[in-house]
Amino acid sequence: MSLEEKLLRNDVESYLRGEEPPADVLAVAPRLEQWAPGITRAPDGGYALTLCGLPFGHPRVPDGKPTTTGEIVWLDRKGRWARTLTRLWNLGEPEGTEIPIDGVEL
């Protein structure tokens, strides 16, 4: 198991216990503004929940350049943060749209 996989497993286990990410970890996580949920094809051919929005503080995406996150593993029920397979995101103001299902074969 890779270090990234171990960190993800530990994070999900802590969320299942009702814990939230530590404040110091959230403080350095990139922020996603004007975010909206989306659905994309997962590598296994299924579907994955993602978030689309404007990132700030991401190590590889320029600030304010529209982006789509990786697959969402955990979404804070109050919409304050989200965990993807590879990173934690602070969530700013949502765009206000619902999850699009156009083009998704159900």
Image (tube, grey):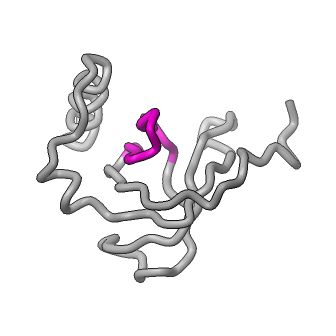
Range of magenta residues: 71-85
Return the residue nearer the eye: 92 or 11: 92
Q: Residue at x 56, y 60 (%)?
A: 35
Pick the quarter of the image with the C terminus.
top right
Where residue 53 sits: x, y (%)? Answer: 55, 65
Return the residue nearer the eye: 105 or 13: 13
Q: Residue at x 51, y 71 (%)?
A: 54
Return the residue nearer the eye: 105 or 79: 79
Residue 80 painted magenta? yes
Where residue 34 sits: x, y (%)? Answer: 56, 65
- Side (left or right) of 15 relative to 106: left
Where residue 105 sits: x, y (%)? Answer: 87, 36
- Side (left or right) of 89 relative to 73: left
Where residue 22 sits: x, y (%)? Answer: 15, 42
Q: Residue at x 37, y 64 (%)?
A: 31
What is the total number of numbered labels drawn onto the structure image?
0
Q: Residue at x 38, y 43 (%)?
A: 83
- Side (left or right) of 103 relative to 58: right
Farthest left residue in view: 24
Image quarter of residue 95: bottom right
Farthest top residue in view: 17
Position of residue 75 relative to residue 37, above or below, is above
Image quarter of residue 42: top right
Pick the quarter of the image with the N terminus.
top left
